[in-house]
Amino acid sequence: MQDREDGNPTVLIVEDDLSLADEMAISLRHHGMQVLTAPDWDQALARVEANQIDIIVLDQLLGSVDSIPRLPRLRMLTQVPVLVLTANQREADRILALEIGADDFLIKPISGRELVARVRAHLRRAAAAAPAAGEAKPRWRFSLPERLLYRPDSSIVPLTAAEFELLAQLLETPNQPVDRETLTRRVFMRPWRSEERAIDNLVLHLRQKLGPGGERSIVTIRNQGYAFTAFPDV
């Protein structure tokens, strides 16, 4: 991975309108930020893998590609703030994006001043949430051999056998939706019936046991099932 040349934050702009990307880059560079650009989804992933990125401004529509359903793939590579740039006014799409990986929305057209202010605000929040240098951030621990889930303070989350099996299945494919049929067969050892709510109720209970932020740890993907994103922050 390529390091920054200095301590200035690096912004990745993913935008297929090259003139708009240039305008945003000029505004950000004028305020001391380094900027990388990518005109499509595949190049965006390549940029993230090859460079140390601090924040991403991601256009929702990249040609024929809607980037919102692909946010879980991006979240497998990085946890930096992702600001989705869109002209889309549909609330359902915005809610879905926030549930599966976006941190904020920027509505087109956006001025250079607002862009800089939003980027700076998210960089401040990310810096405040980061552990101090040399300080290891406590983590959740999922032990399959012990069939236990440990909180960051090493206390045990009291899971039922069904809740443990559900979480184990979701953790096998993080950030990827698992359908109710698969979950029902894994957890209850029987086929799923469209009228039943057993899996939905189990997900609700598991979210509650994960504590504040549990609803963002296991997200609902419309018409696809459920996906595990990350354990709640401590």
Image: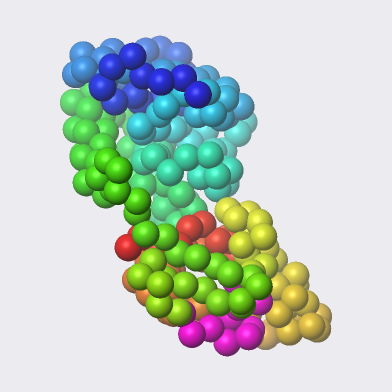
Q: How many numbered marks does the figure carry?
A: 0
Would you identify the image quadrant in which residue 111 lies? top left
Q: Quadrant of the C terminus?
A: bottom left
- Camera-nearest residue between 147 and 43: 147
- Of residue 197 and residue 4, the one placed in the foreground of this image is 4
115 shown above or below 202: above
Which residue does the image show at 45% across and 79% down from the upper left?
156
Query: Could you tell whether 32 is left or right of 232 in the image?
Result: left
Residue 31: x, y in percent?
Answer: 19, 18
Which residues lie in the magenta part?
157-167
The image's colour scheme reads rainbow
Query: For the view shown, which residue lies furthest in the front direction?
Result: 134
The vertical placement of 31 against 45, above or below, is: above
| Coordinates of residue 136 in the picture (x, y in percent) | 35, 51
Q: Relative to 45, does residue 80 appear above or below in the rendering? A: below
Residue 48: in magenta span: no
Residue at 57 percent across and 87 percent down: it is 160
Residue 63, located in which quarter of the rendered image? top right
Coordinates of residue 93 in the picture (x, y in percent): 47, 51
Secondary structure that dominates the magenta span: helix
Q: Nearer the viewer, residue 222 or 172?
A: 172
Nearer to me, 38 or 8: 8
Picture residue at 51% right of the left edge, 57% below the top: 229
Q: Residue at x 33, y 14 (%)?
A: 5
Residue 118 x/y as whole percent: 24, 36
Q: Is residue 197 visible?
A: no
Image-based side of 213 in relation to 218, left or right: left
Quarter of image, res 222: bottom right
Residue 1, compared with residue 195, is above or below; it is above
Q: Is residue 60 visible?
A: yes
